[in-house]
Image (cartoon, helix red, strand yellow):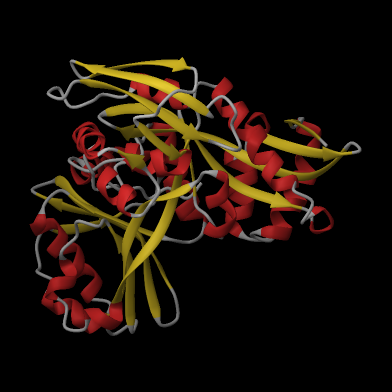
Amino acid sequence: MEFRLINAADTEAVKLLWSYCFEQQDHPFFNWFFSDYYQPENVLGGYDQGRLVTCIHIIPYEILLREKPLPVAFLVGLATAPGSRGSGAAGKLLRAALNEARGRGQYASILIPRRNGFYRPLGWELCYHHYHYDVAAADLVHVAKRHGAFRRVDSVDEWPALAGVYEAFVAGRHGYAVRRAANWRSLLAAHLAEKGFIYVLEDGGRPKGYILYHRGENVLTVTEMAYADGRAQQALFYFLYQHRYQTERIEWNAPLDDVVHFALPNPKKEVWLHPFMAGRIVDVAALLTVIRYPPGPAGQMVLCVEDGLADWNNGCFALEIAGGQGRVTRVAEDKADVSCPVGALAQLVFGRLSARELAAAGRLTASPQGVALLDQLFPPRVNYINEYF
């Protein structure tokens, strides 16, 4: 099987694979995606005797990782023709996608796993979780308070009103998407194409919150909600509460440091942990060199990584840390100070799990001193991301 970036002439075949696996060709998102967002140069295909049988979209993104905005590959829309499933084509395509991402200078990869059991053995581990809320609309009275004024947004040109709120919302969090103008325009355009509603909360003429949502028959689904402070959050819930005579339930996702569930009357049945996005390291040596480390700790270690998909990651690396900077060199296999699979290393670098937690789970091997140093170098963080394409 041959793996390469597709040609524009392959677009119809890409559409057929997408419509078989995801939205149909008459779906509003499908129409928007392939008319306004799709770029053939970002699609990697697998060809069997010249016929496209599997493909994946490698969307360039930036995320804040260890205090630096870094280019990453957001893998979207892995689709395989039914006759080629079970042949290993998808796994081989993902290997080729990692190689392509490395060539593009993308340090890590993120994706939304439909089945975690497929991606996990290939090195993608869950690095982002949300709280998912599915709450009786009337129960929002416990967290709602009227404040400010709301205005509807119906043009992608109004994205700057949301951008400042988003930056305030993600401040202090980790792993979030660094959104540029093009990202905002795509987000709003896709939402409006699917007949979604967008409202901005203003206080004294300044944006303090925003909400993107869809109204269904008995549920209002929030696709994104952000606020600059607690008062703005209460105002957004008041806005949602005012829909209690139109809908029975309100659902939304929130970061893991969200505390709204403490104030709800029935959180055991209305709030749960939602595994959202997986992360993977594309290039171990490059990533450990470019990220920032806490300024205090210094040290060195030999780190041995197991990676069955990307051979350039498989092996041992000498990591030296000084002044918040890392220096990495590949070394011959020697006595490792730390050893782990590449997925565990991703969860450590992304800040989703600590070295202590990984060691306790049997997924990282190190001395007690090594574990302590790793937890100084890679302290756990509150990850948040809300990108879908």
343 versus 117 height, above or below: above
Residue 78 vs residue 350: left or right?
Answer: right
Q: Is residue 139 above or below residue 207?
A: below
Q: Where is residue 298 drawn, in percent x and y?
A: 18, 21
Taking the spot 46% from the left edge, 16% from the top edge, the residue there is: 331
**In this picture, is 269 found above or below 209?**
below
Q: Could you say which is closer to the camera, residue 275 or residue 216?
A: 275
Decide which of 242, 322 is in the foreground and name it. Answer: 322
Residue 345 visible from this viewpoint: yes
| Residue occupying image coordinates x 59% and y 58% | 28
Picture quadrant of residue 101? top right
| Position of residue 164 measured from the top left corner of the image (x, y, whole percent) | 22, 39
Q: Quadrant of residue 295?
A: top left
Residue under the point 55% across and 59% down: 117
> Is 258 left or right of 346, judged from the image as shown?
left
Residue name at image x 44 percent, y 23 percent = 334
- Picture quarter with the N terminus: top right
Whether residue 199 is visible: no
